Image (spheres, helix red, strand yellow):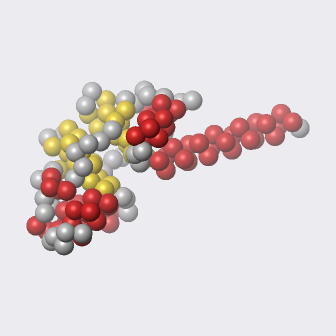
Amino acid sequence: MGQIRDIMEKDVITIENDKTAQDAAKIIAENDISFLVVMNDGIPQGVLSESDFVRRIAVEDKKSSEVLISEIMSYKFRSVDPTTTIEDAIQKMLNKNIRRLLVLDNEKLVGVVTQTDLASYLRDQLLVDGTIKSISND
């Protein structure tokens, strides 16, 4: 199996931690994504997901333009190194029941891998394996 660097998304959309929830919501909507990596002086500080908006703004009936990201983001995030094997990353996501892993190289954000990325990779592997078996049987 390959390494995370082979399948990670390198163009990660980020936001600084001093922005408002409304700023974040606009970026999420404009880019049709489900989360942002929250940065503080170039270092990942946390993750802000759509569910954070629901749980910490909508449910509490807060005004998004008045809420700082730092008040609603998830400070806990899991990460892997670019050389982590895809199998190890899958196992980590399953064990921790998480949807995404940040990819850090010496604490610098270099990518992200999501459940969707892993499912796509595994689908491609199954298709390749199926094609090889089909050719071998012919």
Nearer to us in this view, 52 or 138 = 52
Nearer to us in this view, 13 or 52 = 52
Residue 51 at x, y percent in the picture: 32, 60
Q: Is residue 7 left or right of residue 135?
A: left
Residue 92 at x, y percent in the picture: 43, 35
Residue 48 at x, y percent in the picture: 27, 54
- Residue found at the very far right of the displayed protein: 138
Residue found 11% across the figure and 53% down from its top: 18
Residue found 40% across the figure and 45% down from its top: 98
Q: Is residue 112 above or below residue 88?
A: below
- Give the quarter of the figure containing the N terminus: top right
Q: Is residue 131 visible?
A: yes
Numbered label tally: 0
Residue 126 at x, y percent in the picture: 67, 42
Residue found 87% across the figure and 36% down from its top: 137
Residue found 19% across the figure and 56% down from its top: 72
Nearer to us in this view, 46 or 40 = 46
Q: Is residue 6 visible?
A: no
Q: Is residue 42 above or below residue 28?
A: above
Q: Is residue 90 left or right of residue 72?
A: right
Q: Is residue 22 left or right of residue 86?
A: left
- Give the quarter of the figure containing the C terminus: top right
In terms of image quadrants, where is residue 93?
top left
